[in-house]
């Protein structure tokens, strides 16, 4: 009788284990879904709710294939048909750059769309974020993202910029708009804000909810990538400042219906683009009156002496970066009488989800004083 | 004496051969230049004047790496540091899709920019063409390429299109413009004409030379890629025709300053986009009056009965495709009193250089009759 109970117990335990294991496997399989930024028709890469990335590639003759994401390389495994599959540890919610490594060659994953970051067009993946609704493509009126090629005497070429115009722009031919100049980071370019940054969809959604004033956003290349990263001390802001202030802004004010004055002009940037924003807004107090730094430095009140106060100073960072430094810098500015606002993106690091959220927080604060 | 002369002759011949061989090798090395559509800072892939493509990738552990272009796989060779280099046979001038094969994995070349074609974002290369000046980025006034997201009830989503507006568009707020609807081919999408097609630069250059009237170009996804290639008989034009005629055209006519009538509307397409153009212009004679087919079928006069004659029928092809069929079809149309024009792109096949040239030939012929 004793043995019978023991055997029954063991049998039940074993069956229970089997069922659990099977369920887990089923759950695990079911929860991996194609990333929203895959190539049309591509099932892989996938992401699950924990933020793990799983990808797959056929490479029958390869000895070693790895998924390289977040600074870690994960070994993938080959099946009988030569298809390699592998998974990463959980990633932060939001957008990440990644690549594959096939027998020593670093290449984009053919399954993903490609984005410019880390100084190259390469793979990107979207780990679903709890707040992803704010940058989703919805059934609301949509603004445009316009590629312009503007003449630049100082660099002797036609330079590219992307210009977001709000949905009403073409329907209100007698109305003029303020402008935000919005910069990418090191290793990125003028495509980064409209592509992985989703700047246009963030604005479309805010506007549909009546949460921001309509304004134009201009995104151009900040000429940051020609220097070695870490060589920031050697970075000379003059060439880009000349392009932006002497060439691009006049072109925009001629070709778009802008409110072409300081009161209706803002500058913001992320990471090295924040560094550029700080330098240019300090050099050119007569050009901008709204200043915003995303994950890239702070303003000190002494830097803002001998000038009229800007309408707004916005400084943001991911909670996994240096939130205390940002909060205390903003407190200091507030004590000195500045209209300063800090924002900390919870659970994110030095990546685009921090900056999408920063733009989403910044936009409603811009252009509140009409002049 | 006789021997002396013979030996001298042989020596000179040998030396001459050596010098020639050496010069050839030097020339060969020197003439390979980075492709104009490489990633920023990438030296490879390269192209020489013969149209050979040479590329390079570091893959120290790989057993076999191939360059896959024009339907042929070329074995690459590994050096001591694990860097593979390989060259293709000469390619036609113009743009080509290609990829690398690393131990059985087909992947994009990390050195090139990426283009949508062959049903995927992948590598592209530009073999310098003798006539490349017509699509070059020059110091002339530039129009814009605008990304719009237009509402589509029939497909229950926001759909993307790119809209080219001529340089003067923003400077002439009281002027209205004709519109060309321009379709990509099978395996391509709405990015193909503005990216590899260079539609905007072709127009900017023609306008700068006073060779075409200014008009708007609208490029959207032709919904072609969901069917298997070869399954054309099963292709139903209705869904795309509904999006184009009932949804996109009214949106364009509301959001842009268009001349919103048949006399000022053209449709053109390449390959499967030509097939779509033919079907839609035949189904909707009240919508378009300029019809153009690039490398994709012909019109027969009997298909055009019982309707007023279109202002123009333009049919083009590469000389390596079926030029005789196009020429004889156009002769037949001319005999029946149609304003029909044929164009044959010399030395090119079913690729984008044929279609860039076709647009360059077509544009000056459009919208000659104002009503």
Image (cartoon, coloured by chain):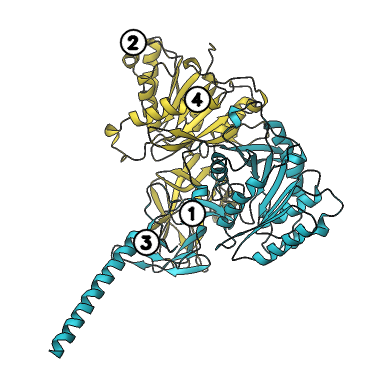
Chain colours: A cyan, B yellow
Q: Residue furthest right?
A: A306
Q: In the picture, residue B187 is in which quadrant?
A: top left
- Measure the C-alpha gap from mark 3 to mark 4: 44 Å
Horizontal side of residue B214 vs B358, given as left or right: right
- Of the numbered discs in the image, which one, if any, rests on residue A331? none
Describe the element under mark 4 as helix, strand or loop: strand
Q: Is residue B18 visible?
A: no
Q: What label sits on residue B109 in the rendered view?
A: 1
The image's mark for residue B306 is 2
Query: Can marks 3 and 1 be said to lie on one chain?
Result: no
Marks 4/1: CA–CA distance: 34 Å
Q: In the rendered structure, the residue with mark 4 lies on which chain?
A: B
Calculate the distance from the C-alpha at mark 3 to the C-alpha at mark 1: 16 Å
**Pointer 3: what residue?**
A59
Q: Confirm whether circles 4 and 1 share one chain.
A: yes
Q: Nearer the viewer, mark 3 or mark 2?
A: 2
Distance of label 3 from label 2 (alpha carbons): 57 Å
Tell which subunit mark 2 falls on.
Answer: B
Residue B83 lies left or right of residue A221; in this view the side is left
Same chain assignment for discs 3 and 2: no
Residue A7 in view in this figure: yes
């Amino acid at each position: 009788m004793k043995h019978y109970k023991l055997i029954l117990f063991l049998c039940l335990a074993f069956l229970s284990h089997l069922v659990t294991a099977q369920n887990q496997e089923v759950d695990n399989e079911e929860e991996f879904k194609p990333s929203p930024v895959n190539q049309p028709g591509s099932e892989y890469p996938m992401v699950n709710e924990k933020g793990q990335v799983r990808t797959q590639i056929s490479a029958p003759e390869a000895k070693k294939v790895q998924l390289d994401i977040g600074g870690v390389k994960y070994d993938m495994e080959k099946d009988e048909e030569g298809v390699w599959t592998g998974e990463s540890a959980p990633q932060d919610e939001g957008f990440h750059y990644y690549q594959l490594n096939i027998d020593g060659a670093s290449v984009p994953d053919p399954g993903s769309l490609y984005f410019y970051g880390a100084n190259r067009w390469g793979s990107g993946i979207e780990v679903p974020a709890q707040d992803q609704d704010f940058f989703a493509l919805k059934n609301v009126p949509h603004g445009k993202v316009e590629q312009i090629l503007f003449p630049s005497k100082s660099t002797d070429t036609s330079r590219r910029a992307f210009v977001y115009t709000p949905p009403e722009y073409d329907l209100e031919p007698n109305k003029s708009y303020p402008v935000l100049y919005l910069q990418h980071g090191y290793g990125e370019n003028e495509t980064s804000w409209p592509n992985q940054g989703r700047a246009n969809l963030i604005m479309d959604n805010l506007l549909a909810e009546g949460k921001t004033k309509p304004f134009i956003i201009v995104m151009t290349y900040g000429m940051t990538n020609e220097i070695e990263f870490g060589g920031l001390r050697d970075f000379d802001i003059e060439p880009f400042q000349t392009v932006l202030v002497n060439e691009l802004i006049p072109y925009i004010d001629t070709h778009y219906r802008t409110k072409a004055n300081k009161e209706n002009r803002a500058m913001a940037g992320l990471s090295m683009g924040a560094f550029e924003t700080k330098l240019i807004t300090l050099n050119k107090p007569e050009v901008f009156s709204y200043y915003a730094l995303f994950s890239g430095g702070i303003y000190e009140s002494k830097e803002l002496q001998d000038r009229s106060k800007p309408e707004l100073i916005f400084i943001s960072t991911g909670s996994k970066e240096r939130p205390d430094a940002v909060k205390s810098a903003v407190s200091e500015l507030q004590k000195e009488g500045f209209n300063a606002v800090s924002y900390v993106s919870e659970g994110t690091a030095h990546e685009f989800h921090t900056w999408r959220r920063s733009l989403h927080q910044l936009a409603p604060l811009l252009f509140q004083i009409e002049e």
